[in-house]
Amino acid sequence: MKLRFIVAICAVVFLVGFCRSLQAQELGPGFHKIKDGIYTFAPDQATTTCSFVVTEVGVVLIDSCNSPLDSRRMAAAIKKVTDKPVMFLIDTETHSDHTGNHFIFSPPATVINAEGAAAGMKKEYNPKRAETLAAKSPELRAALEGFRMITPHIEYKDKMTINLGERTFELIYLKNVHSFADTAVWMPKERVLFASSAANVRTFINLRPTVVLPDVIASYKLMKSLNPEVVVAGHGQPTTTKIFDEYEGYYTLLMKRVGEMAALGKSLDDVKKELKMPEYADWNGQDRLGVNIDAAWKSVKR
Ligand SMILES: [Zn+2]
């Protein structure tokens, strides 16, 4: 009797587990189910992450995916899960790998990012991007049909709250962490955080000249203080706050080494030639160490 009971429990546990994984798999490769109604497309550690959240009145999308093929997959996945429209599209940054395919979702989606986002997108807009992509394959050309650049319809300052159906989305502006306007999206009830590209997953980030490393570290402290259960970064598969610790450790060590070399009178060029970060030899994007040193140099020379 006892054995039968255990077997029955195991069967239920197995079936629940099996059904869950099937649900995410049904949406296609690269899709992860974070929690009920919360899905992320993140096939590997490099591809731009995009996510969607279903509420009882409509869908909220976070970033519009890099390849228009991924955006079309995303649109199809949303349709499989719900017949509700995409009401809001929140950008976590301004770069085209996150914002270039708004046209696939808007209209009907209202696009939102922090103050300065539209100006930033226009500044970096590459009018040839769509044309160059379309020339790569007939599939890409088809996926780009109707392409046009759409900048955010709404820009907020510092903080914004969206209450949609049963869910709450808190948009938090992160200053100087990655692009011209970066937004973290916090879902307090679900304890899910979409963390922008302030930190990624074990990858050297292409730090632009506007990035200020002490501000980046401050953003990690802020995001950690929310105590999220799941962290979805701008690139890479769903993770936890451990990425904030990893990146804080990395940038702190980088600034320390750069500071010590600068104190010895070395030039930026010397530092770039001599500085090694063997502790992070297994991270992706090793060719970006140079731009990381630029950012650290700026911080220690302030
Ligand atoms: Zn970016």
Image (cartoon, rainbow, N blue to C red):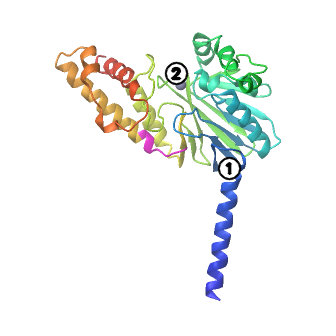
Q: Is residue 241 magenta?
A: yes
Q: Is residue 49 magenta?
A: no
Where in the figure is residue 212, as x and y percent of width and height? 41, 22
| Quadrant in which the N terminus appears | bottom right
Q: Is residue 26 above or below residue 93?
A: below
Relative placement, left or right, of 32 versus 258 is right
Q: Is residue 46 above or below residue 7?
A: above
Which dot marks residue 179?
2
Q: Residue at point 70% right, 30% down?
A: 69
Q: Quadrant of residue 210?
A: top left
Find the magenta span and give its range: 238-244
Q: Is residue 269 above or below residue 244?
A: above
Q: Residue at point 72% right, 36% down?
A: 73
Where in the figure is residue 80, as x and y percent of width and height? 78, 44
Q: Residue furthest front?
A: 137
The reply to whether discs 1 and 2 touch (Cβ–Cβ < 8 Å) is no
Relative placement, left or right, of 45 versus 297 is right
Question: According to the image, label 1 marks what residue?
Answer: 24
Q: Nearer the viewer, residue 296 or 159?
A: 296
Count of labels in the image: 2
Q: Residue at point 47% right, 22% down?
A: 176
- What amino acid is labelled 2 in the image? Ser
Q: Quadrant of residue 298?
A: top left
- What amino acid is labelled 1 in the image? Ala
Q: Quadrant of residue 138?
A: top right
Where in the figure is residue 256, as x and y percent of width and height? 26, 29
Which comes before the other along the chain, label 1 or label 2?
A: 1
Relative placement, left or right, of 212 versus 77 is left
Question: Cβ(mark 2) to ligand 1 < 8 Å?
Answer: yes
Tag 1, which secondary structure? Answer: helix
Mark 1, other Cα within 10 Å: few <14 / some 14–19 / many ≥20:
some
Q: Residue furthest left?
A: 264
